[in-house]
Amino acid sequence: MLEVSQLSKRYGRHAVLDAVELSLAPGSLNVLVGPNGAGKSTLLRLLAQLERPTGGRILLDGQRLRAEQVGYLPQDLRFHPLLSVRRVLRFYADVWRQSPEAVQAALVRWGLEAHADKRTRELSGGLRQRLGLAALSLRPVQLLLLDEPGLSLDPHWRIQLRSWLRQMTREGAIALVTTHLLPEWGDSMDRLLNCADGKVGEAETENPFELKEAHDG
């Protein structure tokens, strides 16, 4: 169980998150929506241990959450421009003690075999996103955090993304995804959360499509 208690983040006098209370169950796929600037990405960075909270605590199974328990995919992905796709995946596999066979499996799963020897500077936005997902899939973690993972993907790979996340949650992981493409997640998610005014809570609608339209408007 992931338990967030009184989690706050301020930048000077500006409060981005204010005493957030949140619990996420093992094996759950959670989708977080909210207007731009509401603090969704900030929440993910705090959970990923990339920023320090102003206050509050984050526990996983009753213990302080550790960075090695988290896999994080930011919205703005960057890789060294001169490294090949295969070299990037080998690097992460070495860091996370995964086998060469795991690298090959990731290339196949995310449709990157034909692009394995391309330098990352040659990749389109969708291919770069798939490389990020391939790297993330190499890391065995309990908490997966993905910030707008579907924006650069075509419909086929969005389906593959949802399928992979459902597989990971069936194996016990917790997944938290931010999105502006809410209708695509309606049949996949276990829980819909809303971030607004520095707080995170249950989305106040039985129809996630209505919530999507309200945010777009």
Image: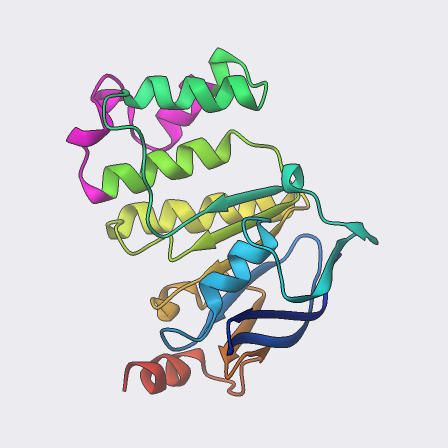
Q: Position of residue 187 (x, y in %)?
A: 47, 65
Q: Is residue 170 above or below residue 100?
A: below
Say if residue 19 shows up in the picture. yes
Q: Position of residue 72 (x, y in %)?
A: 50, 45
Please, what is the dominant secondary structure of the magenta stretch?
helix
Q: Is residue 194 above or below residue 128?
A: below
Query: Which residue corresponds to the image point at 33% horizontal and 18% vertical from the top-left?
Result: 86
Magenta region: 103-125
Locate the N terminus by quadrant: bottom right
Q: Is residue 112 above or below residue 17?
A: above
Query: Which residue is outermost to the top?
Result: 100
Corner quadrant of residue 70:
top right
Q: Is residue 206 left or right of residue 133?
A: right
Query: Which residue corresponds to the image point at 48% horizontal and 14% vertical from the top-left?
Result: 101
Q: Position of residue 76 (x, y in %)?
A: 33, 49
Q: Is residue 151 left or right of residue 207?
A: left
Out of 109 and 14, give the one closest to the viewer.
Answer: 14
Query: Which residue corresponds to the image point at 71% horizontal and 53% vertical from the top-left?
Result: 26
Q: Is residue 148 above or below residue 113?
A: below
Query: Which residue corresponds to the image point at 35% horizontal and 87% vertical from the top-left?
Result: 214
Whether the magenta-drawn stretch holds residue 91 is answered as: no
Say if residue 61 shows up in the picture. no
Out of 6 and 202, give the one closest to the viewer.
Answer: 6
Q: Is residue 73 left or right of residue 212?
A: right
Query: Which residue is outermost to the front?
Result: 12
Whether the magenta-drawn stretch holds residue 122 is answered as: yes
Q: Position of residue 207 (x, y in %)?
A: 46, 83
Locate the C terminus by quadrant: bottom left
